Amino acid sequence: MRNIKLLAIIDHLGGGGAEQQFVNIVNNITAEKQVYLTVARGVRLASLDSRIPLSGGYGGRTPLKSIMKIRGLIESFQPDIVHSFLMYSCFLTALALKLSRVKPVFIAQEFSSPEEIMKEVNFGYLKKQILKLTYKQADKVLTISKAVMEDMIQIKYVSGGKAAFIHDGLDIKKYKNLKDKMALRKELGLEDGLFYICFAGSLVKRKGPHFLIKAFRRLPYPNIRLLLIGKGDMAEELKRESADDVRISFLGYRTNAVEYIKSADLFVLPSVYEGLPNVVIEAMAAGTPVVATNIYGTPELIEDKKSGILVPAGDVDALEKAISEMIGNTGEREMFSKEALTRADYFSIERMAGDYQAMYSTLLEKPTTKRPR
């Protein structure tokens, strides 16, 4: 395949899984690349290959400036493909392409079900209609799990012929090459003889930390500990509600979260919705058994009772039961860990980059697909 020209667009590069995948995709595909950020900030900026030209960022969301900047980049760079990530960036890109004299292939990518996202935003109905118009203009609407793709087709955000999915990929070797559990525990100051349960993610309602804390507080075992890694608008409320339970620790945002995940005996993700949770892939690759909710793309990672346990979202009773089962069954934890380690190999950066490369090639080979002019 000839070397393509790619313009990649995203809102910002914060600490979320979507931003991590943006960096993984852009850093690892073969292309002449430029990146545009509507807001040039975020912890993931440091992970972006410094050789990739970077533009944008006005210190805040200024749609008109961003639209004109994207249009200018398209006309000057003349990319073969414009690939935008997340709702806001996709909308700006669609408007910029309407104004541009150059018409590259346009890929719009979302990481979770838009229907779920609309529950958390203002003017949800209006934004839903805008998003449908945006997707209508795109040559391909991409998601990161089959479940989210099927959801978008079913609720008529996009037609089946235009929708596709590519599973995320991580640097699996990095997680498998971590120090062993006991060495990490010593470095992190974790006590011997305790059973550690770890959660890593934003402390927001859609991640379900309140369900986990309720389930954990019911467990009668004095030698268990819950480590919550992350920050979010529920943090202070959760701290107040669990202040009387010395077994619960709030560690805030940690750049070495995966070391805590590896050190733990169990990883739990009780989310209400997820596209394809990267943190579960990290736990699988680190060999830490997983309890997670049976939602959207998570069953594409964890096979219930084979490589982990899946429970209904929001069901505190089921979550408590699953955690208790894992605490009491060393053999089951070892079996889940072994299966998850094997399954994690599929979710590599190399496989993911190859999938994106193949998709780009296919789109550019179609005679009906738009081309720069």
Image (cartoon, grey):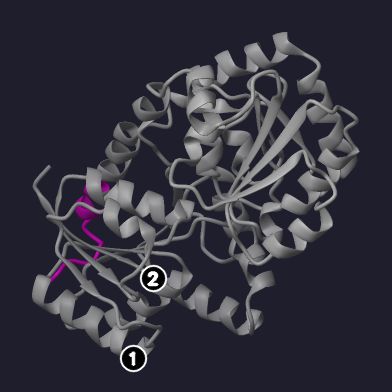
Vertical relation: 275 (above or below) 37:
above
Instruction: Name the one closer to the observer, 272 or 78.
Output: 272
Q: Tell me which label, 2 or 1, sits earlier in the chain.
A: 2
Residue sitting nearer the eye, 86 or 177: 177
Q: Quadrant of the N terminus?
A: top left
Q: CA distance from mark 2 to mark 1?
A: 14 Å
Q: Which residues are magenta?
A: 361-372
Query: Is 198 positioned to the left or the right of 343 in the image?
Result: right
Instruction: Identify the residue at image location x=28%, y=79%.
Output: 97
Residue 27 x/y as whole percent: 23, 48
Q: How many marks?
A: 2
Secondary structure of residue under mark 1: helix
Provide the residue designation for mark 2: 11
Residue 23: % across, % down:
31, 52
Is residue 346 a member of the stretch shown in magenta?
A: no
Q: Amino acid at mark 1?
A: Leu
Q: Determine whether the residue tagged by mark 2 lies in a helix, strand or loop.
A: loop
Q: Residue furthest bottom?
A: 64
Is 370 part of what is drawn in magenta? Answer: yes
On screen, residue 67 above or below 226: below
User: Which of the pair 174/247 is nearer the observer?
Assistant: 247
Name the residue that disc number 1 marks. Answer: 64
Res 296 seen here: yes
Q: Residues within 10 Å of mark 1 (few under 14, many from 20)?
A: few
In the rendered structure, the answer to whether residue 300 lies left or right of residue 138 reads right
